[in-house]
Structure formats: C-alpha cells, structure tokens
Image (cartoon, rainbow, N blue to C red):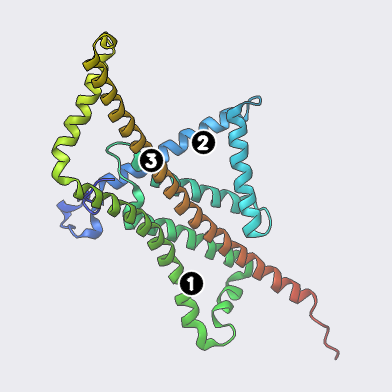
Amino acid sequence: MSAGLFDHHIVKPFACLGLTSNFWSIHSDIVMGTWIAMGILLIITLVGRFFLSRKKSPITLVYEKAIGLFIRVSVDNIGSFHKNYFCFVSSLFLFTLFCCIVGLIPFVEESTRDLNTALAIALSSFLYVQYQKISLHGITGYLKEFVDPFAVMAPLHIVGEVSKIASMAFRLFGNIVGGGVILGMVIDLCGRYRIFVTPAIFSCITLHFIFSFLPYEKYPALRITQKIINSCLNTLFVITWIQIILGIGEAMMQSFVLTMLTATYLGMALQHGADEHKEKEHKPLELA
C-alpha cells in the first residue's frame, strides 16, 4: 500500500454530459485491483476444478481441506449445512480475502482500502441475510420482527438492522486503512533517508550478482564485502517476508470476521424460524 492512502486515480467518464460530481467518478486503481482479485480467484477456482476431477494429489487434498473448513464454519454458525448458504459464505470470504491481499502485488492497491468497496461487500452480506429472512418467514413474518414486542420498538429494530451495514463496512475499511496508516508513518519516519534506500538496495543486488562471478575467496577484503552484502540482502528478505505474512494474516482475519458475522446472522434467522415452527407445532388446541 502506498503512503497516499486516499489518493486515487479518478476517471470521470460522464464529464462530457456535465456529470462531474464525486458520485459519477470512478477510482480506476480500485477497479483494477478488484478485477485482478477476481481474476486470481477465477484462476484458483479453475485449477481446483481441474484437480478435483482427477486422481488424488497434494493439491487435491489442499482444496478438499479448504472446502471442509468452509463446511465446518457453515455448520457451526448456521446450525446445519445448506448448499446456498455455504456457497455464499465461502464466496464472501474468498472475495474479501483476495481484495485485501491483492495489494501485495507491486503497483496494485487493495480494493478494500476504498470505503465504496467495503460498503459494497457489507451491503451484499446484509441484503442476502434480509432476503433469506423474507424467504423463510414471508414478508408478513419479516415485518412482524420489527414490531415485536411493541410497535413503538420498530424504529430501534430498523436502526439496529441498518447499523449492521456500517459495522461490517467500517470494521473492514478501518482495519485495512489502519495498517496502511502505520506503514505510511514508518515511511514518513524514514523519509529523510528514502533517497538513499532504493539506490542502496539495487547496489547490493548488483554487487551480489557481480560477486558470483569473482573469485572473492582469495581476497580477504572482497570476502568481507561479500558477507556484508549478503547480510544486507538477508535482512531485506526477512523484512519483506514479515510484511507479506502480516499482510496475509490481516487480510485473513478481516475476511474471517466478516464471514463469521454473516454466518451468525444467517444462523440467527434460521434459529428464529425453527423456534416459530416449533411453537406452532406445540400450540395447544383451543376447545370450543
């Protein structure tokens, strides 16, 4: 992630029509990051489909373990296995994950660092849960939840439901941007020496390549220089991998939290529907 967290490449495709407000603007870098994430996800899906249709292999076992993990998450939080819920929950996790970790690719920005993307993901989760509630309880039963136990509670129930969108969106957006803010602060602290860092890195790589063709073992000075260069490159390698691991860990954590919230909301809707059905079954008969 670049230090300019809120600096986007803005395209105004409808400027010729006089529509130049921010609503009609497109953040091209965010759109590119989203499409790259979807492309990577599509490739992984096609590779998994290929290996799952073949004989057992280590890659097949990896995909089977991943599918089994999503099934357990669905069963533990929803209460039972439903194919549609499983597909939505797993798709939500994978899409959010790749939108977060796509920023590890050079010159590509995380899609979720834009509030629009985080809001779209949260809104998709919210609308899917509401749709399932309506499908399960019917429109009458769905609206009845907002006036239970008293009609005066309806505004509070509506605010509580709508606040789930803000909660999920700002949790995802805030954590991703927070990591970028910390990285930006580190870069700013090192800003005084930034002009020397890049030439030093490329010099170390070039010297390491040159030393591979020189008989530096015969000369003590060259041998010491070669060890210093290797130490610098090893340090750079460790720092790079720490940043990659932390970035992947943060992305997995945020995707997992969002997925767990969605699965929990689905489980609550199903449990409420099961309780209503059980009450109807055990309702005592009224004698005339």
Q: Earlier in the sequence, mark 3 or mark 1?
A: 1
Q: Is residue 9 visible?
A: no
- Image point 79% across, 74% down: which residue? 281
Residue occupied by mark 2: 45
Asked whether disc 3 touches disc 1, contact meaning CB atoms under 8 Å apart, the reply is: no
* Residue 21, above or below 244: below
Separation of disc 2 and disc 1 at Cα?
Answer: 33 Å
Which structural element holds mark 1? helix
Q: Residues within 10 Å of mark 3 (few under 14, many from 20)?
A: few
Which structural element holds mark 2? helix
Q: Residue furthest right?
A: 287
Give left or right: position of 88 versus 14: right
Separation of disc 2 and disc 3 at Cα?
Answer: 27 Å
Location of residue 103 in the rendering, given as x and y in whole percent from the top left corner: 34, 42
Which structural element holds mark 3? helix
Q: Earlier in the sequence, mark 2 or mark 1?
A: 2
Location of residue 189 in the rendering, given as x and y in whole percent from the top left corner: 20, 50
Amino acid type assigned to the residue bearing label 2 in the image: Thr
Q: Nearer the viewer, residue 91 or 214?
A: 214
- Image point 47% across, 48% down: which residue? 252
Give left or right: position of 64 versus 249: right
Location of residue 14 in the rendering, given as x and y in whole percent from the top left corner: 20, 52
Asked whether disc 2 touches disc 3, contact meaning CB atoms under 8 Å apart, the reply is: no
Q: State the mark number for residue 242.
A: 3
